[in-house]
Image (cartoon, rainbow, N blue to C red):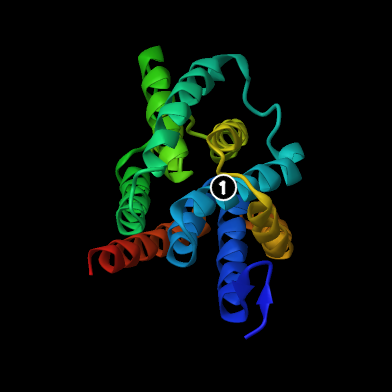
Amino acid sequence: MTAVAGFELAQLLLVWAVVALAAVLRGFTGFGFALVAVPVFSLIMPPTEAVVLSALLTLTISLLGIRSYWGVVPLLPMWPLVLMAFVGTAAGTLVVTVISASRFQLWAGLSVILACLGMTLFRPLKQPLHPVFAWLTGLLSGLMNGALAIPGPPMIIYAMLQEPQPHRSRALLMTFFLAASLLALASYSVAGFVNMHSFGYFLAALPALYAGDRLGVYLFRRFGSALYRHIALAGLLALGVSIVVRALL
């Protein structure tokens, strides 16, 4: 069977479908790209290649839509999040070098389920969170960023509590994930994970990424996040459970 950028045709079609779905979700809600993509990537490539591909695509989609979220939330209050994410990402990168593929899939699937629970159980607070939560969230997100390229679950919960307005919550998540993807790629480069195969995978997935992002942004502007939030939650939960079951079998 013909291979494209290291993918067999069936694998390439799967990657396109997953990347497009993840990009639509991310463009609409501000989160979810890595939550959808990484568990599926890990089914067809080693963990180190899966996290690099996810980080490259997350950085690209963050730059593609930067005008839709940049400046919506102030940057200065985010520095504890980013600083601790840097520390956590460096530490988390060590984990991905020793974790098995099945264990990687298990933790990735559990991360998706955790994010779904966070979106279900937590609601915005009337008062801002204590600053210590920003430091803790940044560290936990960084650890997951380095180990799984999935910084989302702790950050999603933080954004749900901190920002009651959907457009501000979306902007906070997108701004943080831009920084997190840069930190992850820097850490993966130092660890030697990034190679020519990484860019081949990236280029193969790029058309689906662009199409999905444009559709997601359009849906957000047209419909807002109320209806799609429930659909996204159900889809993510189903994905997380299926990945965990597969990892345990």
Q: Residue furthest bottom?
A: 1
Q: Where does residue 192 sit, x and y in percent of width and height?
A: 56, 39
Q: Where does residue 62 sit, x and y in percent of width and height?
A: 67, 42
> In the rendered view, would you say 229 is above or below 68?
below
Q: Is residue 24 visible?
A: yes
| 101 to the left or right of 56 | left
Residue 138 lies in what quarter of the image?
top left
Indicate the quadrant containing the C terminus: top left, top right, bottom left or bottom right.
bottom left
Task: Give the residue displayed 41% in from the left and 59% down from the top.
Answer: 236
Secondary element under disc 1, as helix, strand or loop, is helix
Q: Nearer the viewer, residue 117 or 93?
A: 93
Q: How many marks?
A: 1
Q: Amino acid at mark 1?
A: Val
Q: Is residue 229 visible?
A: no
User: Mark 1 highlights which residue?
Assistant: 52
Tell me if mark 1 has few (under 14), some (14-19) or many (20+) residues whose alpha carbon lies within 10 angstroms of its own: many
Residue 25 lies in what quarter of the image?
bottom right
Q: Nearer the viewer, residue 52 or 27?
A: 52
| 200 to the left or right of 114 | right
Indicate the quadrant containing the N terminus: top left, top right, bottom left or bottom right.
bottom right
Residue 42 lies in what quarter of the image?
bottom left
> In the rendered view, would you say 184 is above or below 243?
above
Task: Give the residue displayed 67% in from the left and 82% down from the top.
Answer: 2
> In the rendered view, would you say 135 is above or below 211?
above
Q: Residue furthest left?
A: 249
Q: Where does residue 40 sit, x and y in percent of width and height?
A: 46, 63
Q: Where does residue 38 sit, x and y in percent of width and height?
A: 48, 55
